[in-house]
Image: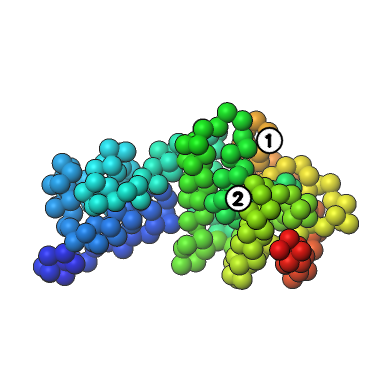
Amino acid sequence: MDVVTGAVMPAPKELDPTAGPAARFGADLRKYRYAAKLTQAQLADQIGYSKSRIGNVERGDEKPTRELIELCEAALGLDGTLLTHWSAISGNGIPTWYRQWPPIERKADQIISVAPLIIPGLAQTDEYARAIFTGEPHTTPQQVEEAVQARLERQAIFNRPTPPQYLAVIDEGILYRPIGDGSVTRRQLEHLITMAENSWFNVQLVPYEALCTAALVGPIVLAQENGVPIAAYVESALHGRVVDKPDEIKRLVRLLECVRKAALPEYLSMQRIKGRVAAWS
């Protein structure tokens, strides 16, 4: 039965908002259309698009234009809610050299991040990410917000019924490095503690006393599928790149294994993180 008209209709296709930015937008569009008690045809009439176009967008089969999003906003009486998806859909805020990575990340069933300086992107809060992007020279407030939304969009993979197994291996220095102000960093660490309550989210800390220089090479993210590494992402001060050559992936895997051997077990890692939060408070 159609939730708007009461007519008997075929069941709408179940949406998977974790499939990507367009699918995430489509799920939100359907949610707000239902709330406004509009059919796809009625919404299409109001904004001057075809019903099939609205259906394609809701299913995530077609990317919406910014004009379509703005028209839907007006028709549904929203104030920027749907436009928050635009940066991820359009790729604004995402460097060209990075755009290859998010689809790989969404495909993976296991992800390992090594972070020597800051909390890895998949585990960041919005305010922590905002403080990082704000610190980049010559960045406008709009560019900052687009970059933050794009980063948060990546985290949608954790909303799946079966999220990927995720391991963040972080250096102990991150616990003491203020990003933004002290409260931003403290809340970020509290977020880590909360996320680690999930069986699929794990954190290991590389302590100072391990003297592990391998952890200082720079951020690395390794994506695996069915236990097999499929690609990695490495970053420098200027840009990053996706690594997919088998010999290069093998070298990165060896490096990650070295760092993990130096890291504390998860329960000891969480003890140190909780202790730092308590001290910061």
In the image, 173 versus 246, the foreground residue is: 173
Image coordinates of residue 67 in percent, x first then y, are 27, 37
In the image, 158 versus 118, the foreground residue is: 118
Disc number placed over residue 236 in the picture, else none: 1
Q: Earlier in the sequence, mark 1 or mark 2?
A: 2
Give left or right: position of 124 versus 116.
left
Q: Quadrant of residue 232?
A: top right
Q: To which residue does mark 2 refer?
A: 128
Q: Secondary structure at mark 2?
A: helix
Q: Residue at x 22, y 66 (%)?
A: 11
In the image, 124 versus 137, the foreground residue is: 137
Give left or right: position of 248 versus 122.
right
Q: Residue at x 40, y 47 (%)?
A: 84
Locate the N terminus by quadrant: bottom left
Give left or right: position of 8 versus 149.
left
Image: 137 above or below 16: above
Residue 265 in sight in this render? no
Give left or right: position of 147 versus 219.
left
Q: Residue at x 65, y 30 (%)?
A: 238
Image coordinates of residue 96 in percent, x first then y, are 51, 32
Q: Quadrant of residue 195?
A: bottom right
Q: Secondary structure at mark 1?
A: loop
Disc number placed over residue 225 in the picture, else none: none
Image: 211 above or below 93: below
